[in-house]
């Protein structure tokens, strides 16, 4: 799964790209690990590179 770091600027770009709607809005957006399919679309879209793969 991917995670959203504190670098998140809550722009919403990632949520629009998620094919399984695993990203929820907030001051820092969150990815639901149970829904995430590791497609990477969100990370590719993030303008501040705040989305990284989980270790």
Image (cartoon, helix red, strand yellow):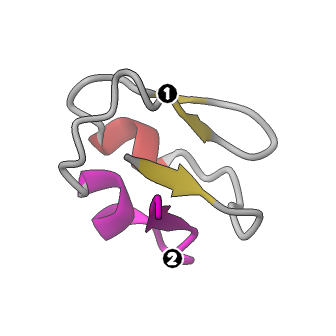
In the image, taking residue 33 as reference, residue 6 lies left or right, namely right
What secondary structure is found at the residue carrying circle 1?
Answer: loop
Pointer 2 with pointer 1, Cβ within 8 A:
no
**Residue 9 % position (x, y):** 71, 61
In the image, taking residue 44 as reference, residue 32 lies left or right, namely right
- Closer to the camera in the image, 21 or 39: 39
Query: Does the magenta-highlighted stretch encompass residue 43?
Result: yes
**Residue 53 % position (x, y):** 41, 63
- Closer to the camera in the image, 35 or 29: 35
What secondary structure is found at the residue carrying circle 2?
Answer: loop
- Write the residue at 34% across / 22% down: 35
Magenta part of the chain: 41-55
| CA separation in Å, label 2 and label 1 | 18 Å
- Write the residue at 61% across / 37% down: 30
Which residue of the protein is positioned furthest toward the bottom in this rendering?
48
**Residue 38 % position (x, y):** 24, 47
Query: Does the magenta-highlighted stretch encompass residue 21?
Result: no
In the image, taking residue 49 as reference, residue 14 lies left or right, namely left
Residue at image mark 1: 32
Say if 44 sits above or below 17 in the image.
Answer: below
> Residue 49 has which mark?
2
């Amino acid at each position: 799964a991917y995670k959203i770091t504190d670098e998140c600027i809550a722009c919403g770009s990632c949520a629009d790209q998620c094919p399984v709607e695993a990203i929820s809005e907030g001051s820092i957006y969150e990815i639901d690990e149970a829904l995430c399919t590791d497609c990477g679309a969100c990370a590719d879209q993030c303008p501040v590179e705040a989305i990284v793969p989980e270790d």
